[in-house]
Amino acid sequence: MTLTIQVDGMGSRSASSPLRPAVEPAFSDLVVVANRLPVKQKGGAERPVLRTIGWETSPGGLVGALAPVLSARTGAWVGWPGCSGPAPGPFDHEGMHLHPVALARSEYEAFYEGFSNATLWPLYHDAIRAPEFRADWWDAYVAVNSRYAERAAAVTAINGSVWVHDYQLQLVPAMLRRLRPDLRIGFFLHIPFPPPELFMHLPWRHEIIEGLLGVDVVGFQEPVAAQNFSRLARRVAGATGAAKHLLHGGRRIEVGAFPISIDVDAVTRIAGNPITTVRAAELRRNLGAPTTLLLGVDRLDYTKGIELRLRAFQELLRDRRLKPGECVMVQIAVPSRGEVSSYAEERERIERLVGEINGEFGQMGRPVVHYLHRSLPFPELVALYRAADVMLVTPLRDGMNLVSKEYVAARTDGAGVLVLSEFAGASRELSSALLVNPHDHEGLKHTIEAAVNLDPLEARKRMRSMRAAVRRHDVHAWAAEFLGALNGH
Ligand code: GDG
């Protein structure tokens, strides 16, 4: 087969000439396609891209799980390097071939901030905020998806496998199949897949379903999401066959749930380090040695239920069911999508509420809510997990939620109480958490109060069962299961 490689801003080249000296060999038999590359620039994302810049691996379970698989198989990763404008050429990093995809500033705004995060994200999260439907955003989504597909087509070996990730790239499977019918193509959605009643609002519903049907295997976090997809594939695209083995366009498509997990060993190692124990004790002291430390850790996102959680804490203090000083809350809100208006508004609401609660219940030098709008180094996060008596994970909707699994993995001491939303995918495996419906305000207050007062023996029993669940199925098992399904197809 003759391949033509399109290099951003450089026209076409024959596949036999190497793209860059760093990339040898030119073709990979396993290629991951994701919105972002698994690396970030050293010294901050805002630096202009120079040929000489250094890159470091981005933290996170997905990268940790896939990097070893890719480096063992001359694997490659196609993604955006994190800065708009021209992209650097392909380069190697820790045994992986990385292929940057360029995005112009205007494309970033329409494809990423617009269609991905102001149309699809709210629609797929139960329309907690109204999705915006704009044809110009859709056009950018199509154009950018086709760029990712072309790049994947250009770098994958004959009969190789491509694993496409997440809601930003749902058109890639069908586009890639048109370019390279020889490939095995898998797709995994990290966020919920909505019920047909909601999905049908999307003016481009047919195109998205057809885009996903380009796969051999499509995976979701939960069985209900897989069922939603199969129902829509029949209704919108006329697919036939069984729900888990659809038939479409003369091909068989496997549809399944592949719940993602975390690198349990990595979290356990950090949690077991004596430095972490010392730091956890120090954190508690710095917070005024409260009787109960409550913790929230989330990207600042309206799906995460941060505001409802803070309101519940405020009312428990007002009702004198919790005592200020005895109970202290830490909320880490990692900056996220601040240019999208619904995120900026959410930040304002949360910060106003934190101010209100501290104004009402704080003492000089002793706030009751400690709020940080920044990302912490991961070992510091693990020390916080170890310091926290009660972990509050109360999203209104969440594909999985890895924070809840990390908290459980970090509690090698067997202590700690997890309050977990029924609407997080993680609630299926972590059913021994104190489960809560965050929309039920009184129920949320009651569950937080119960968590603070939970009998320590009961807490340990619940934690033991959750720890066993997390250990049973880590992120390596997740990657192996998905790739096993793809290879076996
Ligand atoms: C999407 C889906 C699905 C958080 N604060 C800090 C920090 N984090 C890390 C956590 C965790 C990750 O960010 C957050 O993952 P979540 O799963 O909780 O949430 P999303 O970002 O919304 O992820 C979600 C996930 O994809 C995977 O499929 O579970 O449902 O929405 O790993 O540790 N990391 C560091 N400092 C922080 O302050 N270093």
Image: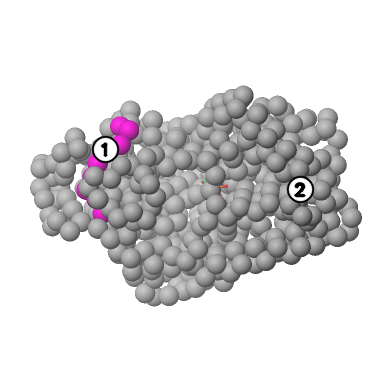
Please state which of the two labelled residues, at mark 2 or mark 1, is closer to the viewer. Answer: 2
Q: Quadrant where the N terminus lies?
A: top left
Secondary structure beneath label 1: strand
Secondary structure beneath label 2: strand
Residue lying furthest right in this view? 320
Q: Please say if 168 is above or below 34.
A: below
Q: Quarter-wise, where is residue 46 in the image?
A: bottom left
Residue range of the region highlighted in magenta in the rendering: 87-95
Q: Is residue 423 left or right of residue 480?
A: right
Three-letter code, disc 1: Asp
Task: Give me the C-alpha separation between circle 2 and circle 1.
Answer: 46 Å
| Nearer the observer, 65 or 179 | 65
Specify few, some or many for label 1: CA neighbours under 10 Å numbering under 14, 14-19, or 20 or more.
some
Q: Quadrant where the C terminus lies?
A: top left
Q: Please say if 322 is above or below 292.
A: below
Q: Please say if 302 is above or below 159.
A: below
> What x and y, as percent, mark residue 184?
32, 42
Residue lying furthest front in this view? 364
Q: Quarter-wise, where is residue 142 in the image?
A: bottom left
Which mark is on residue 289? none
Is residue 228 visible in the rendered image? The answer is no
Magenta stretch holds residue 94: yes
Q: Is residue 374 left or right of residue 178?
A: right
Main SS, magenta region, reads loop
Q: Quarter-wise, where is residue 349 in the image?
A: bottom right
Which mark is on residue 92? 1
> What x and y, as percent, mark residue 154?
21, 48
Q: Is residue 40 left or right of residue 306?
A: left
The residue that mark 2 highlights is: 328
